Image (spheres, rainbow, N blue to C red):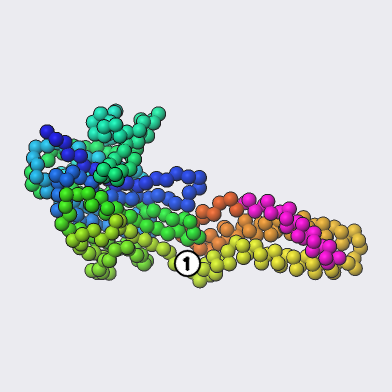
Amino acid sequence: MRLIIWLLLMPCTALANMASPYFWGTHSAAPFSSRLIQIEKEILRIKLSSDFLQAHYDVAYHIISDTSGVVVPLLFYAQDYDSGFQVSFNNKPVMLQNYPYKNAADFLFGDDITYAEDSEQRLVKIYWDKEDFNYYRLGELKYFEVHLQKGRHVIRVNYTANAFIDRSGWINRYTHRYSLSPARHWKGLDSLFVEISTAGFTDTFSTNIHLKKQSDNTLSAGYSQLPAEALLITYAPTPSGFAKLMIGVGPWGITILTMLFTAILFYICIRKLRNYSPAISKIAKISGVLILPMVVVSSYILSFPLIYTIIGEHASRYHDYNFLAIFAYPVLALLYTLIWRIAR
């Protein structure tokens, strides 16, 4: 009896790097199945949270099997999901469990497995087709079995997903993503229905596929073929006018303005102090050369939290290592020394 391997892959590709500007949220994917099984239709319903940071997915896959009496192993890639991950088969709850095989290579994947010291970190090489594959951690695959009979069946998946957060700019950009591309490898897909509920979210967002407004709180559309490789739901918060101004000026603008102001003030003070005692004049000049460069450096470092505060809750707060501006101190000290000599 031939086993039919299904992957209800809901992958969240986690990229690790020091101080990465991205929070990789849930990157969901529709099921990858044997070509013996036809996906008659997929019904995808998404409900956005009031802050857009999460979305609840209710996905129903209506399938047709032309085989009977086979045990079907199903795997889920369950990394970075927030909560409420549930699966049902023909309206009956399915109990998910950790993968039961110590050596998955002996059961499903042949030699396509890479081992690490930690068994939970073993990498499994999954092929979508002969050339299209990816690696997944064994400890993040959830497993169960169903007895498949010939005819129509429904697999239903419910879960809450986290948004992908792009922090590369001053303001966070949020995206929920659902991968549609695995459907290219199915035996067939007759229809796809997408519905997005916005009852809890009142701001403006965009999608990369065309959806019709059905009510104040619902967008939906049906498709006879895949409208895109992935469904993207994106929210880009709009900053206030003052926040836009401060972002436009930026830390460099604030720093340059601070440097110009302190340089002019230092020049004027030195000119005024020429009529005072040499000791007072010298103390003021030395103090200016030592203190004013630090004022300029501090204006650059502190401009970041200042702009973040003005932006508010959607500020990315990603720009690290701005403290390295301290290394500009010697150059600035030479600049103010030059101003001292010109003004005396």
Which residue sits furthest front? 131
Is 91 drawn above or below residue 48 in the view shown? above
Say whether residue 144 is magenta.
no
What residue range appears in magenta?
323-344
Give the residue at x 45% y 44%: 16
| Dot 1 alpha-carbon crowd within 10 angstroms: few under 14, some 14 to 19, many 20 or more | some
Residue 108 or 178: which is nearer the viewer? 108
Which residue sits furthest bottom? 241
Give the residue at x 50% y 47%: 19
Is 83 drawn above or below residue 122 in the view shown? below
Give x and y (percent) for residue 126: 29, 40
The image quadrant of residue 236 is bottom left
- Left or right, 260 with respect to 308, comes to right
The image quadrant of residue 284 is bottom right
Residue 193 or 307: which is nearer the viewer? 193
- Left or right, 33 with respect to 229, comes to left
Residue 169 or 316: which is nearer the viewer? 169
Question: Magenta region, mostly helix, strand or loop?
Answer: helix
Residue 146 or 70: which is nearer the viewer? 70
Type of the residue with mark 1: Pro
Residue, disc 1: 239
| SS of the residue under disc 1 | loop
Give x and y (percent) for residue 169: 49, 59
Q: How many marks?
A: 1
Residue 205 visible here: yes
Give the residue at x 58% y 50%: 321
Which residue sits furthest right? 277
- Left or right, 338 with respect to 317, comes to right
- Left or right, 85 with respect to 191, comes to right
Give the residue at x 52% y 68%: 244
Placement of the N terminus among the 4 image quadrants: top left
Residue 139 visible here: no
